[in-house]
């Protein structure tokens, strides 16, 4: 065979090899999608980002190790990690949920449903997404330290943005329900003053709506939340970030006090079943879990329990 013939044969061999490799990757992708695992979507908390190697990146790798073949999608709200972190302070929560819905719907590996795990405010946002973005369906929703009834204080902040956090605290103390502060700050949109419930209902841009606290109830929110297989609420017993920490279990203050809290079952939200939590509870789908630690100090045993019980099929 002449030199040209050898070169032609070599090209054919290379093409055959590349096609075989590509086919092999395709087979691996198919196996990944058909191995019986349900994908997991993560939503980080305030001051964090989707891909921080010391937080969400580490959790992603751990879940991939514990659930072989699982697809883990850690939500990025923005075009890069810097935007993702800043948007946790300054992007309207309603817009964040819209973007999260778009990203989830654009991921082909999530179209048959997924488990959702939200950390801190990400747990609250995921619950809002479950009520507003029912397709693809969330199977199990795990809120890890999520302030489901909002916050009435911001005593400490996690992450590296302590300057931003101090700025946020000063503005919230100045007037969380003032229009421009509501529009500017994410944390103002889930600020919940127990002594100003009407002002909260009238002016909150997010939480009052998503908790169905207005005089007109959104029946779709109730219907969509009941599509969950389980709603898992994780509370940190020594939490110094979410104030009050009872909010992580939907507990709230009684109607006449800013110091005395009542459990979820004694709140109007539950008794009048604004969100369908009573229905979920009666069906055994509302799970309350406690962790003996400070905010997001999730020990390995507790994380393994969540993975084994709610994320593995």
Image (spheres, rainbow, N blue to C red):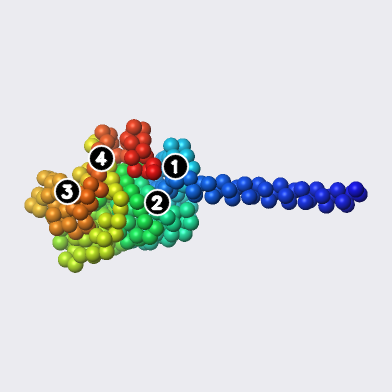
- Element class at badge 2: strand
Residue at the extreme left of the image, as rendered: 256
Q: Position of residue 255 (x, y in %)?
A: 10, 53
Observer-nearest of 275 and 69: 69
Label 1 – label 3 distance at C-alpha: 31 Å
Q: Which residue is mark 3?
A: 264
Quadrant where the C terminus sits is top left
- Element class at badge 1: helix
Q: Is residue 222 visible?
A: yes
Q: Earlier in the sequence, mark 1 or mark 2?
A: 1
Label 1 – label 2 distance at C-alpha: 15 Å
Q: Earlier in the sequence, mark 2 or mark 4?
A: 2
Q: Earlier in the sequence, mark 4 or mark 1?
A: 1
With 14 as the anchor, is 223 left or right in this view? left
With 78 as the anchor, is 287 left or right in this view? left
Q: Earlier in the sequence, mark 3 or mark 4?
A: 3
Label 4 – label 1 distance at C-alpha: 21 Å
What residue appears at the point 36 percent right and 47 percent down from the top-left corner?
A: 117
Q: How many marks overall?
A: 4
Q: Position of residue 90 (x, y in %)?
A: 36, 56
Q: Earlier in the sequence, mark 2 or mark 3?
A: 2
Q: Position of residue 210 (x, y in %)?
A: 26, 59
The answer to whether mark 2 and mark 3 are in CB contact below 8 A is: no
- Element class at badge 3: helix
Q: Is residue 188 visible?
A: no
Mark nearest the camera among 1 and 2 is 2
What residue appears at the point 23 percent right and 65 percent down from the top-left corner?
A: 218
Label 2 – label 4 distance at C-alpha: 21 Å
Q: Which residue is mark 4?
A: 289
Label 3 – label 4 distance at C-alpha: 14 Å
């Amino acid at each position: 065979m002449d030199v040209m013939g050898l070169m032609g044969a070599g090209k054919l061999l290379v093409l055959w090899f590349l096609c075989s490799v590509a086919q092999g990757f395709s087979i691996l992708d198919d196996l990944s999608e058909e191995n019986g695992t349900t994908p997991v979507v993560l939503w980080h908390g305030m001051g964090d980002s989707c891909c921080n190697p010391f937080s969400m990146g580490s959790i992603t790798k751990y879940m991939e190790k514990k659930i072989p073949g699982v697809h883990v999608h850690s939500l990025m709200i923005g075009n890069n990690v810097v935007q993702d972190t800043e948007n946790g302070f300054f992007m309207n929560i309603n817009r964040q949920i819209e973007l999260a819905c778009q990203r989830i719907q654009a991921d082909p590996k999530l179209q048959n449903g997924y488990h959702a795990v939200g950390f801190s405010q990400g747990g609250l946002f995921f619950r809002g997404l479950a009520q507003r973005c029912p397709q693809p369906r969330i199977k199990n929703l795990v809120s890890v330290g999520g302030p489901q009834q909002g916050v009435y204080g911001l005593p400490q902040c996690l992450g590296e943005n302590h300057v931003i956090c101090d700025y946020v605290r000063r503005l919230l103390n100045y007037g969380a329900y003032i229009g421009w502060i509501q529009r500017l700050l994410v944390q103002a949109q889930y600020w919940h003053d127990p002594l100003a419930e009407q002002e909260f209902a009238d002016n909150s841009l997010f939480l009052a709506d998503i908790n169905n606290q207005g005089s007109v109830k959104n029946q779709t929110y109730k219907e969509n939340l009941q599509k969950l297989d389980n709603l898992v609420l994780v509370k940190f017993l020594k939490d110094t970030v979410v104030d009050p920490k009872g909010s992580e279990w939907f507990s709230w203050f009684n109607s006449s006090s800013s110091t005395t809290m009542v459990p979820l079952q004694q709140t109007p939200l539950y008794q009048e079943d604004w969100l369908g939590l009573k229905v979920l509870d009666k069906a055994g789908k509302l799970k309350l879990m406690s962790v003996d630690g400070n905010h997001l100090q999730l020990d390995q045993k507790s994380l393994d329990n969540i993975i084994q019980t709610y994320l593995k099929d």
